[in-house]
Image: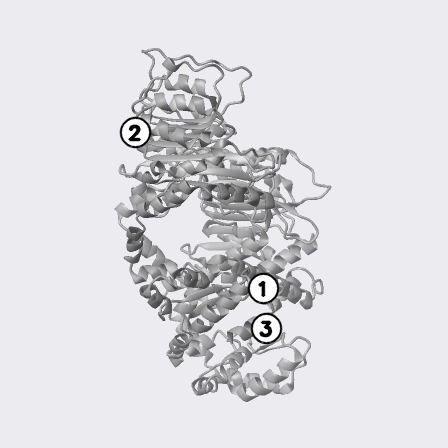
Amino acid sequence: MDKLCIRSYIKTRWLLGLTAAQVHDELIAGYRPGAVSYSTVTNRIKLHFQTHMFQVKRRLSNTESSKEETKKYRTTYDDKKIINCFENLSNELFYEIFDYLEGCDLFKAFSNLNSRFQAMVTSSSLRLKIDLRFHPEVILQYCSTCVVVPNKHRIKLNFRTRMLQVKRGQSTSESSEDETKKLKTTYDDKKITNCFENLSNELFYEIFDYFEGYKLYKAFSNLNSRFQALLTCSSLRLKIDLCFHPEAILQYCANSIVVPNKDRIISLSLANSLLYQFYAEFDELEMFLMKVSPHLEVLRVNSCSDVTYLDANRWERIISKHLLHLNKFEFKYEESIDEELVATVYHERLNEFKSLFWIKRQWFFKISIDTDFWDSNVIVYSIHSYSKDEDIFHKDTNNYQSFIDDIGHNMIEKSIIPDQQEFITSSKMISETTYDDKKQVDCFENLSNELFYEIFDYLEGCDLFKAFSNLNNRFQALLTSSSLRLKIDLRYREETILQYCSTYVVVPNKDRIISFSLGHDHPYNSYPALFKIDSSFSRLESLYNKLSFLALESCIPISIANNEQYSSIKYLIIDHCCSLDDLIAILSYTSQLCRLTCYQLDESKKNIVKDALNSILSLTCISIAECSTKFDEIEMFLTNVSSQLEVLRINTFKDVNYLDANRWERIISQHLHHLNIFEFKYEELAREGLEVTVYHERLNEFNSLFWIKRKWFFRIYIDTRFHDDNMMIYSIYPYRETHSNFHKDKKNDESLSNDISQNLIQHGIILNDNFTLAHMFQFKRQLHNTKSFEEQIKKSRTTYDDKKIISYFENLSNELFYEIFDYLDGYEIYKAFTNLNTRFKVLLTSSSLRLKIDLRYQEETILQYCSTYVVVPNKDRIISLRSPNHDDYNSATWESSIN
């Protein structure tokens, strides 16, 4: 456990900005002399740094967005301009900057830049702070010869602490005492002290607000009577952090600071760490908390030795009775995962951390595994605020592995792997140092209320309240306004979040909810126990309740409706298999139906009675995802159910009769006069046993004038996404459709398979399958050998208005073309546009065009073409170049070809 704590401590302090020397000093003071060597500390920090940088670089190199960011930086930042801005700073400002730097580092960075910095570095106005404790011998000799000796008169001492610190073990010479006397008389400490003491009490209280309580008392308690009065004033609020102090300091803080100032402490952070040999049991902590400030607002506790810390009821009693003003509670308890781990009564009752007491305060319980330890993994039980994005206790240990533990039936959040979290952390650090958060908030708040309502319209109600409810008065007013309409989706919420949403979002806002999504497959209590949907939901426009049931042992037959049995349903989604005769029976009850979507339509179980097919004049759209019904039955269904049908989408297989183009033409021409969107797909396995029928031989009939006039185009391709076999796809799709699916108007139906939603997406033919390729050649040969096909191609060329499309394309502005080109690879741009016309030739040769060339996966012939006609003539316009990496292509040959 010692190794575990030491390692975690080193990384924590390093992330907080401490040097190896400072971390080593703290370990010596807090643990025991000689327990940890200085080299061990430096090696650990180097390892953390190298790992951190490696992960960041790898993420940056593997992320496509990094290329765009690199481009932005390249085009945005002018290094020369930045240097000019830096040099325009005044000398006074430079002296302030220099005051934060160590003397040797200052000379190393600025001494040889230019004459101005040389003059500043040698100026008598500059005071130097020298730290020689942890430099190697060579650097020591350089610093003493070139920095210390020539600048003895400018090395300053603080009023109490000498800034010239010599490496441990190095003997000091007698001359150093003389130099110290000279420095004390040279530097006007009295004047600085007078200026400092002239500050007002109000300003001091603002300064004190940034200090931790122990450091505040340590710095100011013994200065003079004025500061003593400031420290004992009731106006001063103290924030105590006892997480990283040795035992002696802990005892001093408890006796001299915490106990005498109980009524002025507003924040208290505690840690029970073996590193400091501080084994406070929960009984002792409870007694301590009962004695500290009743005004306590923030409490942070880390523990690892007493399992009773997991007693939720006890925490609830302490907070309810003694810490009435507590609004922020952050807790973490750790225990190692080993053979000795025993599940106690407190482990079995972990669900008590999810009671209403915790939910109302928005303090949520979480279990995770921390793998950032040498010897073993550690289970971490933590309580964190609902609005916090990350746990402040271990910004250095976010390498969690996801797991599901039977204890408490807790749903554990999916972990973030180490390199992802390191990259996220580094990105946050960069954004924090680069962006002016206040300016961003100001810009955001300057948006009008109308625009905020438009933004809110895209957000789910619970997420909306989570994000904006506690920001400020303006957003609170927006959220409670009667103009705001809420859409609530409770289908995938955890139990604790579900209780919170129902209590604080749903119930108080019943009259503003316009959409509700529920799910009966929720693993927790049913919704009626939380709220009742009744007439109080006065503005409710849509209620989506997905019903899920186990398979029935016996089917219940559906009878045909009589004239008095009708439903007002207009949109029907059957998200399961259904036979055609059952579908006809269901439709007999829905005379007002407009849209029908069926996931799987099976063959009829009995003969269809033609008289049972009632026409539904309002039905305009039918989508069938998997149709295993014979074509004869589908024909009877389509010709009788609706003459007003406008959209028909159907996926089928088994029955090759579906490939009869003339039959489809007859059905549509005679019965579906209003049909304007027809999407069809027929699938069959591409195997050796594939039988070429008469319908395969007559596939060219799908290219007749009937289909061309309606701009419904026929296509054959191979889908290679299947496990065992490739699939031959015959499809019809409208020309104007870039991506089509069977239920794009059914956005709420999330359960339909990906195969439907990805329907009719074009896939290229894979040429590495000899048999598949042979079949494709067979079909193409049959198509191209017929004269009618060639004639239809000629007709289609004259029918299809290519010229109009080209004219639309050429009417685009140059600026828009440059934006389009920015998304294309340079070789592809030249390949597509170079021989079109003079305008595009001018665009391609313009100096405004920036090229990104990627030649990593090109063949040798393409490489030769690119180097000659793309790379070499455009060297001054290429902003990104990825060279080829073929094993058989010599990089030297490539480099010589472009030089």
Residue 243 spot, x, y in % from top left:
57, 54
Figure check: 319 above or below 446: above
Residue kind at label 3, given as amino acid type = Ala
Label 2 vs label 3: CA separation?
Answer: 67 Å
* Label annotation for residue 673: 2
Q: Which residue is mark 1?
A: 885
Q: Which mark is residue 80?
A: none
Q: Amino acid at mark 2?
A: His
Q: Residue at x 54, y 21 (%)?
A: 551
Question: Callout 3: few (<14), some (14-19), or many (20+) C-alpha neighbours within 10 Å?
Answer: few
Helix, strand, or loop for circle 3?
A: helix
In the displayed structure, does residue 344 sit left or right of residue 443? right
Q: Residue at x 40, y 67 (%)?
A: 850
- Say whether disc 3 or disc 1 marks the residue closer to the N-terminus: 1
Which of the two residues, 724 or 291, is positioned nearer the viewer here?
A: 724
**Amino acid type, label 1:** Asn
| Residue positioned 41% across, 16% down in the render | 585
Question: Is residue 52 placed above or below 152 in the rendered structure?
Answer: above
- Residue 543 location, x and y as percent? 37, 28
Q: Mark 1 or mark 2: which comes first in sequence? A: 2
Distance from Cα at disc 3 to Cα at disc 1? 11 Å
Instruction: Where is residue 113? Give x, y as percent.
Output: 47, 83
Tell whether label 1 touches label 3 (CB within 8 Å): no
Q: On the picture, is 839 further left or further right than 372?
A: left
Q: Residues within 10 Å of mark 1 (few under 14, many from 20)?
A: few
Q: CA distance from mark 1 to mark 2?
A: 58 Å
**Disc 3 marks which residue?**
892
